[in-house]
Amino acid sequence: MMDPISAPFAAAAALLLSGVASSGVLFVPEGHVAVYYRAGRLLNFTAGPGFHTAWPLITRVETVQTTVQTDKVTDIPCGTQGGTLIHFDSIEVVNQLATDAVLDTVRNYTTNYDKTWIYDKIHHEINQICSRSTLEEMYITKFDALDETLRDALQRDIDVHAPGITIIAIRVTKPTIPKSIRANYEAVESERTRLKVSAQTQKVVEQEAETEKKRALIEAEKAAAVEAVTLERQLKMRQNEAQMSAIADEMHLAKAKAEADAEFYRVSREAEANQKRLTPELLQLEAVRALANNTKVFWGEKLPNIYAEGAALLPSGGQESS
């Protein structure tokens, strides 16, 4: 049997051992890597997400994030080339530490590596850029490229000294400048905006005028085309009428010629028939008949010559003496 006096000590020892044993269990969340320190020295291995064990009171464990994270650097003062003091309220740096570079980065810059390469580096680069830039450049003309300039400056030095860190993006807020200077810039910006609106309005008016010009040109071309078609149709009609008139004239001429030829043929044939029919004997006979039909009685010593000549027309065998 256990001595009654030693029983409380056994219970306390068991409780102490269970507490020590439980303190040796650690949990690493997703997107993090655990690094181990023993006696102040960084061990050469890491642990991924999940439950792990470590020697309590001997081994110290810290976790390092390896997913994309955003570090926000605030209240950054800087002096411009002209001596004006401006402030950046905040600059956000999106970055990521590669898993295979955790040990080297932590060994060189501890688990707070982002203080050296993000927070302190942003202050340094902003002051470097400000010192060689004017207020107008920092506030207006170069502000749109400031985030890319910072990103490239950080990444250039990080690639040399801490190659496991990647600067993904940087977001810079508009700097705060003295109120009097800001009022001047706002007035200038207002005037610039007014000029842009005026220029845009002028461009719209010019485009409308150009559109109207093109529309009028299209209408004129359309009217000209219609007129050309109409003239061509009228010309075709006149040509057709001329052709029809020419054909009618040719037909009339042909008809007249045919009629003339027919009349000439009839007269010719009639003349030929008369030439054959009107023989000298027949002509004498017809003359006598004509005289006989026109018999008249004349009193006197001499007869008219016509009768004497007519009597000569009679055949000699048929004359009688009175």
Image (spheres, rainbow, N blue to C red):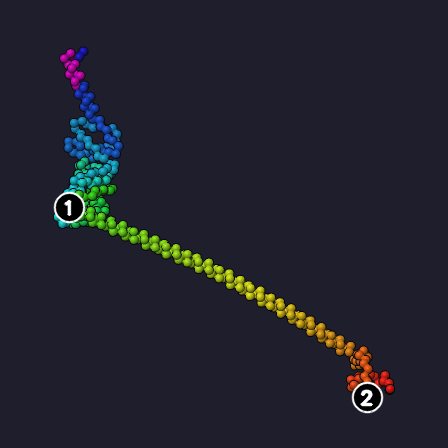
Asked if the magenta segment contains residue 23, the reply would be: no
Q: Residue 123's image quarter?
A: top left
Percent across and percent down for residue 51 are: 25, 28
Q: Residue 180 carries which label?
A: 1
| Residue 320 seen from this side | yes
Residue at 21% x, 33% y: name it.
63
Quarter of the image for the C terminus: give it: bottom right
- Kindly identify the amino acid type of the residue bearing the numbered disc 2: Glu
- Disc 2 crowd rating (10 Å Cα; few below 14, some 14-19, many 20+) is few
Q: In the image as oriented, which residue stretches furthest toward the left?
A: 83
Question: Is 216 left, or right, of 79 in this rendering?
Answer: right
Residue at 61% x, 68% y: name it.
250
Marks 1,2: beta carbons within 8 A? no
Residue at 39% x, 56% y: name it.
216
Q: Main secondary structure of the magenta part?
A: helix
Q: How far apart are marks 1 and 2 (CA)?
A: 166 Å
Residue at 15% x, 14% y: name it.
6
The residues colored magenta run 3-13
Q: Look at the numbered disc 1 and give the secondary structure of its residue.
A: helix
Percent across and percent down for residue 114 are: 19, 38
Foreground of the two, 69 or 2: 69
Q: Look at the numbered disc 2 and give the secondary structure of its residue.
A: loop
- Disc 1 crowd rating (10 Å Cα; few below 14, some 14-19, many 20+) is few
Residue of label 2:
301
Asked if the magenta segment contains residue 11, the reply would be: yes
* Upstream in sequence: badge 1 or badge 2: 1
Q: Residue 314's image quarter?
A: bottom right
Q: Residue 89's image quarter?
A: top left
- Kindly identify the amino acid type of the residue bearing the numbered disc 1: Ser
